[in-house]
Image (cartoon, rainbow, N blue to C red):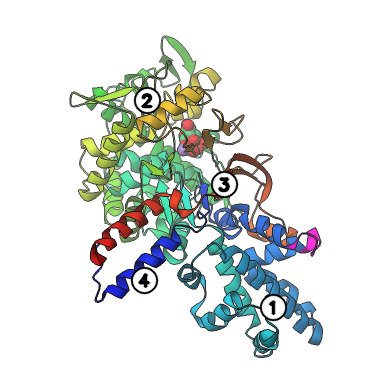
Amino acid sequence: MEEKFTDINEVKTKIINLAATLNLPKGTEAFISDVHGNYDKYLNIIRSGAGNISRKVGELFNGRLTVPNQQKLVCLIYYPEDILKKITPDLKGNDLEQWYMDTTNQMIEVLRYVAEKYPQNIIDQSLDTKFLDISEELVFGDLRAEDKRQYYREMVKQLVKLGLADEFIISLCHAIQKLAIERIHIVGDLYDRGPHPDKVIDHLTETWQNFDFEWGNHDVLWLGSMAGSKLCMMNLIRISARYHNLKLLEDVYGIDLTSMVKFATNRYMPLPNFEPKVAWAGMTDEEKNVDNCIQQAAAIIQFKLEGQAIKRRPEFEMDDRLLLDKLSLDKRTITIDGKDYPIENGCFQTVNPASPYQITNSERVVLIDLINQFIQSNKLNEDMWFLADNGGMYLEHNDNLLFHGCIPVDQKGNLSSIAIDGKAYAGKELLDYSEYIVKDAMRHPTTADCFNSDFIWYLWEGKKSPLFGKDKMTTFEHYFINDKEAQRETPNPFFDLCDEEWFANRILREFELSTRGHIVNGHTPADENANPVMADKKVIVVNGMFDAKRSSKIGGHTLLYDSYGMRLETLKPFANKNKSIAEMSDVVMDKEIVEHSSERRTIKDTDYGKSIQKQIKYLRKFIK
Ligand SMILES: O=P(O)(O)OC[C@H]1O[C@](O)(COP(=O)(O)O)[C@@H](O)[C@@H]1O
Ligand SMILES: [Mn+2]
């Protein structure tokens, strides 16, 4: 964007500031993934700077505060609103005043330390305007200067006397949280399974300056539904019923599910294989039964729509996923690849063996009602365009390549292609094409069956989808066939080859990136992934293990990339915010150095630095 300047000195000052900025240390990037609507855990990680804050507090206070007292300070920074309420009532008179003085001074010390790598304008943006003057004085002033010591002391004293200390401390904590991470990368699967993906978007909209999304397979279900894909929408509703998150659709996105509730409770009875994956506290049996029936109704409509799509899209090569027409007449068995399996707890009452993929009139009424509501939901359009405007299928950033799933390849590591209209799409081209189709579908939403809607569904569960990365999604088998082999989903060879450095280099070169970069993925759950750091530390899998269905010894992984290098943080299992506050527990349980830079990286070494250098070159033209 070309700025207009009134006088030459303005240009020179701008050049001075830009050139100086190049020499500041590189900002800290945090990579998190698979948030799955778990807003509490997301906030716990963000408020802790993905573990960066406790590291900084340790560097500052080791030898000055005991570890438990450091822990208390760190938790106060994460949750000042809650911890202040917990601590201050037990203190009175001078003890209270002294506690506020000590805490305020410690907070200012931490803020100064976290802020020292930023220019003043960035620090100002992180400060609460209500306390801007005082904060600037205390953050930028020389607190050791003899002739100002009383000046600063009195400032803090008056804050306490005037009852502003809590607000002031909270504002300092929020500033520390914001400056602890310069950029957040959300590497997919923000949506599905958890109750509040919308709150993550609200948080980023309201408080965050730099972030980006790399879409996950679950995210495209929502993007596709808003664009009118009935296939995506039925998967989305089935999963929401499966995780008891239909309230998100009703309360946040204004989707009236009455037609689905009436249809589902009328045609289906609760079945054990449709029991909830998670049951939120306080759910009544009645509510659980309704979700059970909705999950069945959505699953059957989904299988029918998928059968229709597979037949009209031979290029998807998914005939092996046509299952309803493999049912026996009495629907008690199914024959797949010549093998008969008993059906357990089938719910095929609306399936007509003569035309198994035919949608019944009552199913059509529900479909049309719901898909029109998805297309017309303002909040859903707003949130989906937020994902689209701030994200995509992948991101090349500071020499690193970020994407959620995989780059489909064959056993030898050669790119696998998908032929669409006679053109083969593979590698970077396949991801670029996928991103184009998603955004084109969003720009032209339609409830009619169309290629865009079908292709976005393909991105959710297609054989060569870069977001799914498995040979099939065995949803049908998981519901009705009690056979591990039949339920198996075979990962794309990409996931095995990821441990080979030559392969990681090939993928980086495919995206025109230097082989000194890293590939950062999400998608593969940390408990399945033996080692999240592979290919001689070139490939890193971050998966924050946010979704409630996974209970594991660890709370997943996040990655931090700052001026000293790259660090993989192993997170503690997170139950909920109140438990974290009660235990005053930190976020991180372990860390692994992925890369240590011999010399500190500066902004000059980043993409942002490259854009600054371009700006300086442009400005120099004015002062020739
Ligand atoms: O991208 P993710 O989170 O792994 O989700 C996709 C996976 O979830 C599944 O759909 C299973 O989901 P459920 O656990 O809800 O049954 C798998 O079939 C599929 O591989
Ligand atoms: Mn995923």
Nearer the camera: disc 2 or disc 1 = 1
Query: Mark 2 vs mark 1: which is more N-terminal?
Result: 1
Instruction: State the separation of the CA atoms marked 2 and 1.
Output: 65 Å
> On the image, which quarter does residue 378 sit in?
bottom left
Q: Amino acid at mark 3?
A: Glu
Could one spot residue 79 in this view of the protein?
A: no
Q: Residues within 10 Å of mark 1 (few under 14, many from 20)?
A: few
Q: Are discs 1 and 3 less than 8 Å apart at CB? A: no
Q: Earlier in the sequence, mark 1 or mark 4?
A: 4
Contact between labelled residues 4 and 1, with CB atoms less than 8 Å apart: no
Residue under circle 2? Answer: 463
Q: Which amino acid type corresponds to the residue marked 2 in the rendered image?
A: Lys
Q: Nearer the viewer, residue 151 or 280?
A: 151
| Region of the chain picked out in magenta, as a range | 61-69
Magenta segment includes 66: yes
Where is residue 103? Give x, y as percent.
Answer: 71, 74
**Can you see residue 115?**
yes
Graded by Cα atoms within 10 Å as few (under 14), some (14 to 19) or many (20 or more), the crowding at tag 3 reads few
Tag 4: amino acid: Thr
- Return the residue at label 4: 13
Of mark 2 and mark 3, the one earlier in the sequence is 2
User: Sequence-wise, which precedes: disc 1 or disc 3?
Assistant: 1
Residue at disc 1, CB closer than 8 Å to ligand 2: no
Which residue matches tag 3?
599
Tell me the number on the disc at residue 613.
Answer: none
Which quadrant would the C terminus be assigned to in this image? bottom left
Q: Position of residue 580 (x, y in %)?
A: 69, 57
Distance in Å between CA atoms under marks 4 and 3: 29 Å
Residue occupied by mark 1: 144
Q: In this view of the protein, which residue sits in the foreground, 424 or 26?
A: 26
Label 3 CB less than 8 angstroms from ligand 2: no
> Mark 1 is on which residue type?
Arg
